[in-house]
Image: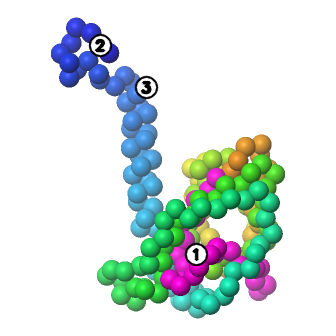
């Protein structure tokens, strides 16, 4: 507190506090804008998404140290009539413990991913990428991949997915060989 000033001015944010508030506001704005990105991704890949089977029962993929929590799920409705009641948006938070992995798999639908803590080692057929907190990437759903946490802290990432409206359970599916 800044004594000697009128009460409304006694609690002004200091420079470090103002910077943190600005960073927090920017982070919030980025995350809020993420709600639009799955729809844009779906529109860019509508033919592929529609062609994917909606009655595929997810088969358990080999994992170690994985915890998943669905944070939000909503069937699409609104001005994009061709999508209404056919697809849903789902946000899932995945935590992978140190030394954990998600074996080779695909997803039923496309989506955007964001690493929020730790590091993800993402192994694709032709390359390996290490994602760090704040990194975003897109998965089309039909590319075989494996995920590892090679760090000594938990890795957390968020999936923003477009899925068939009637899907129950995880979006992971067995490897598709092309």
Residue named by callout 2: 2
Per the rendered image, the range of residues in magenta is 156-178
Name the disc covering residue 16, or none. 3
Sequence-first tag of 1 and 3: 3
| Badge 3 or badge 2: first in the primary sequence | 2
C-alpha gap between disc 2 and disc 1: 52 Å
Kindly indicate whether the residue at mark 2 contacts the one at mark 3 (C-beta within 8 angstroms).
no
Q: Which of 148 and 98 is in front in this view?
A: 98
Magenta stretch holds residue 167: yes
> Residue 160: percent from the left, percent from the top?
53, 66
**In the image, what residue occupies the spot 29% across and 13% down?**
2
Secondary structure at numbered mark 1: loop
19 sits to left or right of 107? left
Under circle 2, the secondary element is: loop
* Badge 3 density bin: few <14, some 14–19, many ≥20, Cα 10 Å: few
Which residue is rendered at x = 37% and y = 80% of the image? 77
Q: Residue at x 39, y 36 (%)?
A: 21
Image side of residue 42 versus residue 63, left or right: left
């Amino acid at each position: 507190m800044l004594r000697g000033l009128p009460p409304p001015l006694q609690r002004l944010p200091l420079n470090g506090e103002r910077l943190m508030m600005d960073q927090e506001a920017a982070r919030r704005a980025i995350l809020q804008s993420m709600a639009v990105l799955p729809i844009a991704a779906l529109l860019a890949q509508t033919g592929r998404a529609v062609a994917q089977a909606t009655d595929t029962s997810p088969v358990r993929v080999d994992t170690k140290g994985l915890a998943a929590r669905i944070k939000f799920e909503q069937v699409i409705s609104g001005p994009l009539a061709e999508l209404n009641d056919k697809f849903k948006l789902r946000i899932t938070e995945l935590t992978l413990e140190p030394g954990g992995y998600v074996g080779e798999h695909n997803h039923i639908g496309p989506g955007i991913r964001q690493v929020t803590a730790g590091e993800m080692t993402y192994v694709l057929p032709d390359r390996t990428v290490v994602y760090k907190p704040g990194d975003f990437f897109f998965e089309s759903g039909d590319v075989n991949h494996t995920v590892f946490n090679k760090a000594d802290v938990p890795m957390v990432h968020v999936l923003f997915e477009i899925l068939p409206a009637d899907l129950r359970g995880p979006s992971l599916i067995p490897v598709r060989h092309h």
